[in-house]
Amino acid sequence: MQQKNRPFELSEVQMRTRQLADGVYAVMSTDVDETDHTATNAGFVVGASGVLVVESLSNGRLASQVIGEVRKVTPLPIRFLVNTSFHGDHCFGNFAFPSQTVVLQHEATKRVLDTRFEQDRSFMIGLLGANAGIEEAVARSADVTVTGATSLDLGGKHVDIDHIGFAQTDGDLIVRVRADDVVFVGNMLQAPPPAFPWLLEGRAEEALATYRRLYDILDQNTLIVPGHGRTMGRADILHSVDYIEKLNGLAREAREKGLSVEQAREALAMEEYSHYSMYDFIHLQVNIPAVLTGE
């Protein structure tokens, strides 16, 4: 599979809705069945009194597509918008939602958006490219913050929002519709195998504990909507667990042996994971340095 450094071509992204259960929908890139890493997933849940949307995506154009997909299903108001992290591809479209929509984020996510929005905008432009709508994004952080578990009633449809630990950011949230056994996990999981975790902030041991916790709280029939790919099942989480366990183990061995940086990189190559299209970029350039420095 072709290796790439840009996760997706933002200007080309088109979204479509897939119904996962009665009143529960994923909004995914149209190429989701063709590749192992797509543009960011969104979703929405419809109750008798309104709608909850998960993620606003990278820019106003894609946020408007999500709103348009909601409108194909229901005219009910979008009461809530949940961002699972501060990363711009999950929240930079917030400004396009109605002013009446209540934005929910973890308090750590709100803190980043309130203090480091321009820094993250620069990062996202570097990652996804200039002149694709990120420049026009306007910061819109949480109206309500979440630090633990909370539940919302959409009118006969209950949605649970929870923070179960650090996976990729301090503010990672999961959004769960228990009655339908569906959970949106954001970048906690990138996509089904061969995808593996992106350790953008390091802290691999903390991330590993969170993946194990996620596995424990779900059941074998739970349908998982990851951050960037097809829906997946509980068993797929073990691929991420195994990856981090092996990466951490090899890093410890490299440090104990006193290997040079180049020797350590070779020892941690883990080429059995190279089928993932983001292997060169994420495994070699991001994850290996993260675990070797212990960050």
Image (cartoon, rainbow, N blue to C red):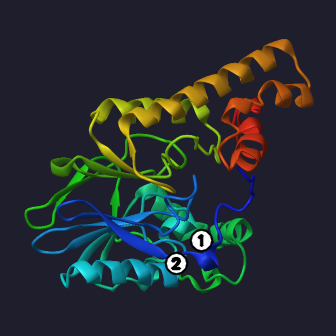
Does any portion of residue 82 appear in the rendered image? no
Instruction: Kindly identify the amino acid type of the residue bearing the numbered disc 1.
Output: Phe
Q: Residues within 10 Å of mark 2 (few under 14, many from 20)?
A: some
Name the element at disc 2.
Answer: loop
Q: Quadrant of residue 210?
A: top left
Can you say whether 40 is above or below 259 in the image?
A: below
Observer-nearest of 107 and 127: 127
Name the residue: 9% across, 67% down: 155
Measure the C-alpha gap from mark 1 to mark 2.
7 Å
Observer-nearest of 142 and 223: 223
Q: Is residue 64 left or right of residue 168?
A: left
Name the residue: 61% across, 83% down: 133
Q: Is residue 89 left or right of residue 235?
A: right
Name the residue: 55% across, 59% down: 34
Can you say whether 33 is above or below 253 in the image?
A: below
Instruction: Kindly identify the amino acid type of the residue bearing the numbered disc 2.
Output: Ala
Q: Are marks 1 and 2 in contact (CB under 8 Å)?
A: yes
Question: Where is mark 2, residue-wise?
Answer: 139
Can you say whether 209 is above or below 159 in the image?
A: above
Observer-nearest of 249 and 100: 249
Does any portion of residue 113 appear in the rendered image? yes
Question: Where is mark 1, residue-wise?
Answer: 117
Name the element at disc 1.
Answer: helix
Rendering coords of residue 179 (x, y %): 15, 49
Q: How many marks?
A: 2
Rendering coords of residue 108 (x, y %): 47, 55
Name the residue: 78% across, 31% down: 269
